Amino acid sequence: MKFKRMLDQDLSGKRVFIRADLNVPQDDAGNITEDTRIRASIPCIEQALKAGAAVMVTSHLGRPTEGAFKLEDSLAPVAKRMGELMGREIPVVADWVNGVTIEPGQLVMLENCRVNKGEKKNDPELAKKMAALCDVFVHDAFGTAHRAEASTYGIAQYAPVACAGPLLAAEMDAIAKALNQPKRPLVAIVAGSKVSTKLTILEALAKNVDQLIVGGGIANTFMLAAGLKIGKSLAEPDLLDAAKAVMAAMTARGASVPIPVDVVCAKTFAADAVATVKAATDVQDDDLILDIGPVTAAQLAEQLKKAGTIVWNGPVGVFEFAAFENGTKTIAHAIAQSSAFSLAGGGDTLAAIAKYGIESNVDYISTGGGAFLEVLEGKTLPAFEVLGSRA
């Protein structure tokens, strides 16, 4: 996909407006409890400053009410933390839509952009005012790439130059490599509690991937569709036809949805529940399936090691409980050992990657939850579309 990159622009003496994703978790006292997004946004800002730009950065934080700023909506704690990491003071500017005074080499943080009236509905008048603040607009917030808002989409339509920052560009490159020009075989792992929340993703991937590994409650529904008993496990019986259609679509292409041959069951959903490994054909009426079995895990690991490209979204079992983590752990290590290009995303997936310490062995870890899922659905994200049109 064609788009302009910030790294290719001449930013010397220019006013640069960066839309970052600084929506970090805070405790009740307003203290930042996890600063990954702040750290991830700094390289873009430092590159612009180094190039001699006057830099304005903004983000949303929380769920403020438009037109009604409250103290807890403020980006001040974010500016403070970013300033500590960058070794500089970062002033926070309120009421910035109608003008910002800034010189090359300076950095200011523009207060929570979602407080501005018309932000979420992408009001063109607001977008034009934002665009008038800058010579170059930089979108570097993949987490908001699926939203067409004034600070993510409208400004990109009207700014003199609109380009992708290094974080967003890396996401766009990784997605293109994994889904548009994949090295085969392309294996996708889609797991989670419900088929309904991932059905459109499964349907989209069924047209493209060579293997579709399902896990969690989704796998239970597919096991039911394959004629297996699942006891009292989480599943969606009303979506059996949809699951059968996905399997049929894969089979018609000479591809497959591997159904577990063994599973790990318990009688209750608890960390201290007794785990029993069973053949998939031996599940009892009072069993809960909480993980794939070791034989299934080993088979899938072998397939992952032979893959050319792997897309991973979701753990295949209740990996938070030690007795039911083997499936996810085995798959995580297989991805880490595979020579395939691997792309992973989604909150639970990131937690599993961190738990098993394989961050350096996954080629690209996506930072956007909803945006990542929409990409897997085959949707063109608004950010990609507008940056493409401006290129």
Image: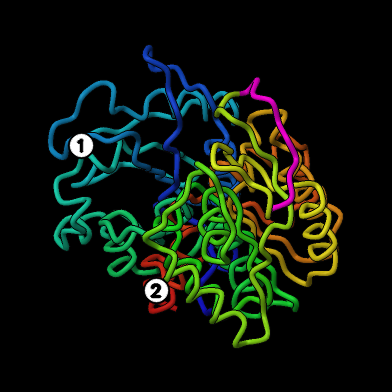
- Residue 320 position in % (x across, y down): 63, 31
Identified at 37% across, 72% down, the residue is 386
Residue 317 against residue 370 in the figure, above or below: above
How many numbered marks are there?
2
Q: In the image, which disc is placed on residue 385?
A: 2
**Picture coordinates of residue 268 (x, y %)?**
56, 28
Q: For the residue marked with disc 1, what is the amino acid? A: Asp
User: Is residue 14 visible to us here?
Assistant: no
Which of disc 2 and disc 1 is earlier in sequence? 1
Type of amino acid at the residue the image marks with label 2:
Glu
Q: Nearer the viewer, residue 99 or 32?
A: 32
Q: How was this image coloured?
A: rainbow
- Image height check: is 101 above or below 271? below
> Relative to 199, is 213 on the left or the right?
right
Q: Is residue 49 visible to us here?
A: yes
Q: How crowded is mark 2: few (under 14 residues within 10 Å), some or many (20 or more)?
A: some
Residue at the image point whose x is 64% and y is 52% from the top: 365
Left or right relative to 18: residue 207: right
Secondary structure of the residue carrying tag 1 is loop
Image-quadrant location for residue 352: top right
